[in-house]
Amino acid sequence: MAARADARHDGEVQKPTGSGPPQDQTSWSGDDAGYRQPAAPAGPAGPAGAAPEHEHWRAWHRDGMTPPWARRPRGRWARGPKDVGPLRRRPEEGLVSGVAAGLAYRTGFEVTVVRLAIVVASLFTGGFVAVAYVVAWLVMPAIGTDTTVWSQARSDRRGITLAGGLASVLFILTFITQLLGSGLLATVEWPLILCPAGLVLIWRNAPGSEQARMRHLAEPLLGLTTDRRWSRSWPRVTFSVVLLIAGTVILVDGHKSIKMLAPLGGAVLVLAAIALLLGPWWLGIARDLVEERRARIRAEERADMAARVHDSVLQTLAMIQRRADQPQQVVQLARAQERELRSWLFDGRAPGSLDDENITFAGGVRRIQQEVEAQHGVAVEAVTVGDCELNDDLGALLAAAREATVNAVKWSGADVVSLFAEVEPEAVSLYVRDRGRGFDPSAVPGDRKGLAESIHARMSRRGGSATVRSAPGQGTEVSLTMPRSAGERQPSRA
Amino acid sequence: MTAPSRPRVVIVDDHGLFRSGVRSELGGQVEVVGEADDVQPAISMIAERLPDVVLLDVHLPGGGGQLVVTALRAALPEVRFLALSASDAPEDVIAVVRAGARGYVTKTISGTDLVDAIRRVAAGDAVFSPRLAGFVLDAFAAMPEASQDRPLFDPELDQLTTREREVLRLIARGYTYKEIARELTISIRTVETHVSSVLRKLQLSTRHQLTRWAAERRLT
């Protein structure tokens, strides 16, 4: 635990200076003990320890004397004025957890610089900054919320057991590696144990959208994907080949001298003993993991179904309430909804799904326009540039776009909603904009299904992204982007 | 050239109801000096009244709106045309703009926006609706290939600059010039310059992509 607190501490000292002026490098490029010392007694007040260096670096800019080393790249390093306010993760803007993005906002550096600093610092400290990163992920609340992943994880006893089990397995593995005299992994043992354990806790307790993103990142490594294409599985294969070669080399190395045979035999005995002792427990954990995955799939299916019911049945019910004084329209709406529901339940055609007919992406956008105009009587101006075949990802994009459009029509009060879609080789982007009353996105309660589930989660489940720009009185713009996978980039224009 | 405070306008549209609707919507902000319902009457009326701006329906019984523009463009360069249509088939819109109209808006445009568009056109600027911006982005999207029948193309006319693309994208997303200027931190005047330059390219570019593209769109 001491190592962990220490590590976290280092991380926070180091991230700013890593990308800071080279002058400061002398304070951390030396041996580990040398640079850890000044901040060590501060304990949890780690950031304060870093403040003087920080102030010094800020002073350059205040005085308007740009130091020579910063003159050219400064524009690329600095992302703009520093964000005041509490340090928060920004999962929407991050690659993994948004910790780096949050730090970037806070320190005023370009996010890429912060990321590089974290990676470089992790390499230099033998992985302890990576531990600090995982800890930061656990204890730093995401922007707009006050709950941390840790506050959830604390009560997750199963997750703690799982993390402990994983840590013990990893500990024994590194222990044996060390016993066999390999220096290869010895230097990174604690981070190698702590990071996965922390990630297990995060995995179990992070909000749904972050889980989806983790899964997206981890899929190729773990081989969870059903897609057996080489492009997806090569990281896993490469990784296992590297492990295999390293292991063989270590073993062969050990056999060279006859003296090594005795400890090797001992190690095997110890291993067997541990396996006997803890084996059943580990097996139990493995079973739990399988069960866990099933439960997750069920939960995801449920969420998908909830999103669809929300888009179809709940929307129609809301419209029926609004038009209670027009019986003709109510009947019409109810009938249309009934038809849709029947075709979903009995013919397996999802409501709002477009793959039942052979239409292209632009056709899908036009259909959203027509249907929303017909149902809600508000003009939708749709503009599409380029076109391509529909697939599941773009279907999800269209479903999210439909939801955003319906939201705009229902809540903005604007008499026209603009829909702009552009198909580019790398990605498809779609913008839904209105000039209506707008709202404060950070003030939307988390349980409002429309924005959170139907738009954000739907996009992130497929690797896309959604951002909402709005302010009271200034209208709203929802930007949706879905990357296109390599296989379908050949231009197709209708 | 500065815009007259009350531009003189002729409305050319075959729907009487629409003409009177526009006339009342424009209110006192422009001076409607005439109305016409077909190509020939429109040509003679415009030549006689010499308005600042002609609001021109793309679809007229006696032929497309571009006939009116083509007939008068050379003789009366100071009369500016703003195309209007209800349905926007890209080939018609591109045709009327390439004939010389200074802009294109849909008939769903609000009264204030229409007055604004008329003022802009009267001042010599270009007016793009989101739809037209989308068409132009689409038409200029494919990189021109140097083919046998036309090995050279003019990059000045056949390609859009990055900035012009950005401006068009924002127009297509429903941004006004003012909002675009704020978004890109440039002046409104610069936005107008970019749009005018796009209009010039659209009118002068001879790349067959444009015509071919419009013809292809007809099939879908």
Image (cartoon, helix red, strand yellow):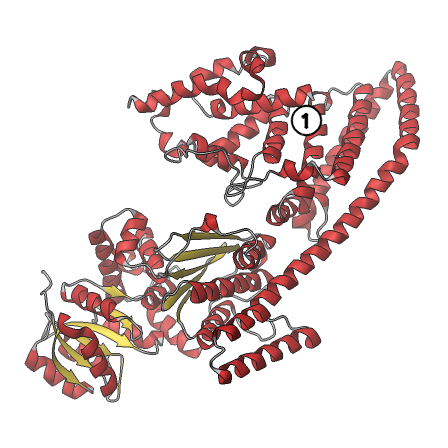
Residue A97 picture location, percent across and down: 57, 40
Q: Residue at x 39, y 59 (%)?
A: B143
Is residue A462 visible in the rendered image? The answer is yes
Is residue A249 visible in the rendered image? The answer is no
- Quadrant the N terminus of chain A occupies: top right
Say which quarter of the image contains residue A122.
top right
Q: Is residue B3 left or right of residue B64?
A: left
Q: Residue at x 48, y 73 (%)?
A: A322
Q: Give above or below for A327 relative to A106.
A: below
Q: Secondary structure at mark 1?
A: helix
Residue A121 picture location, percent across and down: 56, 25
Residue A372 picture location, percent across and down: 47, 72
Residue that sits furthest to the front in the current view? A325
At label 1, counting other C-alpha atoms closer than 10 Å, the crowd grade (few under 14, some 14-19, many 20 or more) is many
Residue named by callout 1 = A191
Q: Give above or below for B205 relative to A356.
A: above
Q: Is residue B115 left or right of residue A95?
A: left
